[in-house]
Image: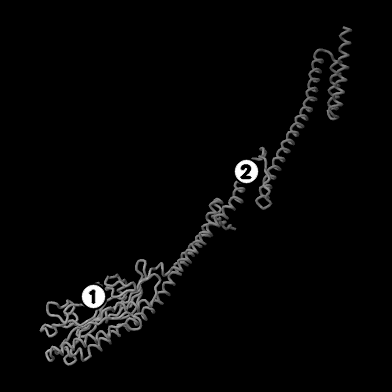
Amino acid sequence: MRLRPRLINPLTRLTMKRQLVLLFLIIMVPVFALHLYGGRKAEQILKNNVTSAYVELNKQNYSLIERDIDAINKITRTILQNPVLQRLGHPEQFSAYERIKQFEALDELLASYSTAMSGSRAVDYSFYAHDPDGYFSFAPSTQLSMRGVYFFGDVEMPDWYPEALEKKGTGYLKIFAAYGPVSKQPTLAYVRAVNSTERADRPIGVLVATGVEHIVRESLNTVTLPEGEIFFTNGDDQVLASSSGEIGQTIDVPGKEKMSYQGTYSAVHEDHIYVVHYNEYRQQKLVYRMPVEALLSQQTELRQALQTITVGLAFAVMLIMFYFWRSLMTPLQKLVGFVRIYEPGRSLPAYRETGRHDEIGVLMSSVHAMASRLNALFENQYKLEIKQREAQLKLLYEQINPHLLYNTLESIYWKCSLDGHSESAQMIKELSRLMRIALSCGIGVLMFLVLALLAVIRNRLQDKGASA
């Protein structure tokens, strides 16, 4: 029967220190990964939800701006259809006095519409007409105030006047870089050519409504963005109005590839989120620009709190592992070092009681007690072997002495026989026989007999020597 190969735990190849480090990584890496994934997922969900909400808000805000511009458009339509303005198309039919009255009536008409409504800032209406024949030479040819009626010749004609006539009565928004007799501040104007109601191809002049940026700005300020800005631009991304009041500059609006005939889209560019509503027919855009950090401030606070908790958890785990390292691994390392250098029978270092009653304390005391018992057993075994060897030597010695004496008696027996002392030889032979018998009776009896026989032999020999 073939035995299955035994699986080896790869962790057993690592030291306990490395196993603890690996355990720390196994615990903390998923926590950090979950934290990063959760933070990014929450940020993405929050971006999508907030952006969707601002997309709908942008649509409503643009509808409000369209309503304000349509209101101005209706006022200009009303003004251009007024008979007072239409009569200016035939100056040759009226006398100078009548033309002065027409001028005053038109100025009063424009002043009546250039009044503030509902607490908002007024839109100023002005009329510009080309008068090459000088019918209205008494009228100002250059701008004297924020509103008024102006007639000019070929020399004084503004550069924007031909452009307005080319629109053929279609109103459009235009920025005047320097408008006003004193401050020359830039302004957003609604410009519309006035044609004769009798002949549409016959222009009378151009009607200009200035200060439109203030009306649009009031509509923009109905929306509050978190540290963001709102821009109302034309098709070339030139700012027509903004929540901060600045106009005329050009901004970078990303995501142009998402623009359709009319619609709203969102785009993320660098550190900002853009929500853009585009109207191709009017060549207008309503742009919301919001910093990502401001938009996600609450989520950022939550993420920072989670980061703090995660770092604190990691620090706490490190402290706990360090405590267990000092409490468990240090005694175990000492115990491993003791086991590695321990040799049975060698003197043991003095064991100091740690006062621990857990498994580590029991293991350490048990190992030291076992080593002490092993040393005691080795010492007893050593002493026992010494005693056994001594007994064997003693027994051997006791066995050697009788045999030596017996051999000596045999030598004396042969010596006496050769010298002719037959009686002495006989006695010695008897003594040898007696020794053989006495060997089995114990060493004490044997020695007594030997000494007695030796004394008898000596006396005999002395008697013979005396008689001789």
Secondary element at image label 1: loop
Res 407 quadrant in image? top right
Q: Earlier in the sequence, mark 1 or mark 2?
A: 1
Res 165 quadrant in image? bottom left
Q: Where in the figure is residue 82, as x and y percent of width and height?
A: 23, 90
Q: Where in the figure is residue 95, as x and y percent of width and height?
A: 12, 90
Tell me which colouring the rendered structure shows: one colour
Kindly give the residue lying farthest to the top in the view shown. Answer: 468
Residue in front for this viewpoint, 365 or 250: 250
Front: mark 1 or 2: 1
Position of 330 relative to 261 (above/below): above
Kindly give the residue lying farthest to the left in the view shown. Answer: 133
> Hey, what amino acid is under mark 2?
Phe
Secondary element at image label 2: helix
Q: Within 10 angstroms of label 2, few (less than 14), some, or many (20 or more) residues?
A: some
The residue that label 1 is drawn on is 180
The quadrant of the image that shows the C terminus is: top right
Q: Whole-Å distance between the Cαs marked 1 and 2?
A: 99 Å
Q: Where in the figure is residue 459, as x and y percent of width and height?
A: 88, 14
The residue that label 2 is drawn on is 338
The residue shown at (73%, 38%) is 380
The residue shown at (85%, 16%) is 424
Residue in front for this viewpoint, 126 or 467: 126
Q: Within 10 angstroms of label 1, few (less than 14), some, or many (20 or more) residues?
A: some
Residue in front for this viewpoint, 268 or 130: 130
Position of 192 relative to 10 (above/below): below
Q: Is residue 380 left or right of residue 210?
A: right
> Hey, what amino acid is under mark 1?
Gly
Res 265 quadrant in image? bottom left
